[in-house]
Image (cartoon, rainbow, N blue to C red):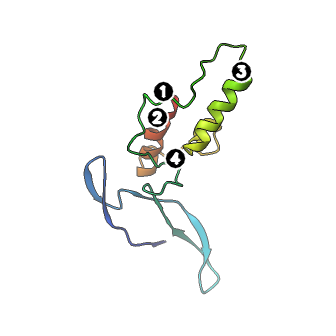
């Protein structure tokens, strides 16, 4: 398994090598034609990452200004989906982002972001 270089970054105030960089496994072909795994880095500071949290994100944020009453499901649903999509968090609700093992750093990031979404 080949690993990419990691930088010293912090996660929750703890300084650790590669703390903001998470690894996913991708199969590649080696020069001899044998399959091997590469581990590219997923950067939490990248706004395109589903694990990215802006400094202004908190559990009190309102992503939908309309309160669900039952009669307004269509309007409410459209606003909620657009709000989650704009924050790149819709994957947590529609389950297209699979929950990683909680013992990994990526699992910790998933739990943190999922907690922000379900509040």
Residue 105 rendering spot, x and y as whole percentages: 40, 51
Q: Residue at x 30, y 46 (%)?
A: 12
* Residue at numbered disc 3: 73
User: Residues under labels 1 and 2: Cα distance?
Assistant: 6 Å
Q: Which mark is residue 116?
A: 2
Q: Give 4 or 31, whichever is nearer the viewer.
A: 4
Q: Quick one: label 1, few (<14), some, or many (20+) residues within 10 Å?
A: few
Instruction: Work out which residue is located at the far front of the displayed protein and give it.
Output: 65
Residue 69 rendering spot, x and y as whole percentages: 65, 13
Query: Tag 2's secondary structure?
Result: helix
Closer to the camera: disc 4 or disc 1? 1
96 vs 37, left or right, is: right
Query: Tag 4's secondary structure?
Result: loop
User: Residues under labels 2 and 4: Cα distance?
Assistant: 17 Å
Tell whether label 3 touches label 1 (CB within 8 Å): no
User: Residues under labels 4 and 3: Cα distance?
Assistant: 32 Å
* Residue at numbered disc 1: 119
């Amino acid at each position: 398994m080949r690993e990419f270089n990691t930088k010293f970054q912090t996660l929750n105030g703890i300084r650790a090598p590669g703390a903001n960089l998470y690894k996913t496994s991708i199969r590649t072909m080696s020069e001899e034609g044998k399959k091997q795994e590469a581990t590219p880095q997923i950067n939490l500071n990248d706004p395109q990452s589903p694990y990215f949290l802006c400094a202004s994100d908190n559990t009190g944020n309102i992503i939908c200004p309309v309160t669900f009453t039952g009669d307004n499901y269509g309007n409410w649903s459209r606003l909620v989906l657009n709000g989650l999509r704009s924050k790149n968090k819709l994957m947590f609700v529609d389950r297209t982002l699979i929950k990683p093992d909680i013992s990994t750093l990526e699992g910790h990031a998933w739990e943190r972001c999922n907690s922000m979404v379900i509040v």
